[in-house]
Image: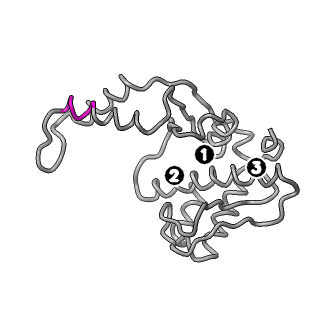
Amino acid sequence: RLAAEHEPASVVAYPLVSRGERFPFLAADAEPFVLGRPTDDGDRYAALLQGVALVERLCLAYIRFLGAPAQSPIAFTGGATSSPYWNQLRADVLGLTATVPEHTDSALGMAVLAAHGVRAGEVRAGGVQAGGEASLLSAVRGMIRVRTILDPRPRISARFAGPFVTLVDALERRGWLPSETAAYAREHG
């Protein structure tokens, strides 16, 4: 509730839990920061939640920069999915439709991969047998049930364009985010 009153927050946060970043860029000396002074505890909390979502947005921009698809729908998993507000915030910041499965822990992903391995049969040297990708998708569709579908709210999504660019600029200025990646993220993120 507190965070919802601050969309976007008056400050931009890069919320690392410890020193160093490995993705979406490699910077052993990266440290958390907040740009500006939050107006209150709700603003600070909102900045941290939004900061996580902004970094996720940067991750997806980097994946696209590398040439891989990063498109809707995406799936949210893990403990954070217990917060409907944060799920919607993340969909809004990412600008992508997101799904939340009924079971969100990582054990389900391992079970899907195990089922795929059983169905795909033996793995040849150099990769999965022909049709292996299709059988993986079949395993996913057969085992994962969607609990929630979240569409981004365009008016809300637009509010986070500025904070995203502010974060990208700050990461680049610190020498952590390569300029080429930053330029791509500003244009396509």
Question: Quick check: 122 left or right of 33?
Answer: left
The amino acid beneath tag 1 is Leu
Q: Position of residue 36 (x, y in %)?
A: 80, 66
Identify the residue shown where x is 40% and y is 36%: 107
- Indicate whether residue 119 is drawn in magenta: yes
Quadrant assignment for the N terminus: top right
Which residue is painted at 67% across and 63% down in the image? 167
Q: Position of residue 92 (x, y in %)?
A: 66, 41
- Point out the tag, 1 or 2, that comes first from the N-terminus: 2
Instruction: State which quadrant residue 80 falls in.
Output: top right
Alpha-carbon neighbours of circle 2 within 10 Å: few (<14), some, or many (≥20)? Answer: many
Amino acid type for the residue under numbered disc 3: Ala
CA–CA distance in space, label 3 to label 1: 16 Å
- The numbered disc on residue 46 is 3
What span is colored magenta in the figure? Answer: 115-120
Residue 115, above or below 19: above
Name the disc covering residue 60, or none. 2
Which of discs 3 and 2 lies nearer the camera? The answer is 3
Could you tell me how far apart the alpha carbons at marks 1 and 2 are, in whole angstroms? 8 Å
Residue 169, x across and y down, in percent: 66, 68
Which disc is residue 94 wearing?
1
Q: Residues within 10 Å of mark 1 (few under 14, many from 20)?
A: many
Q: Nearer the viewer, residue 49 or 55?
A: 49
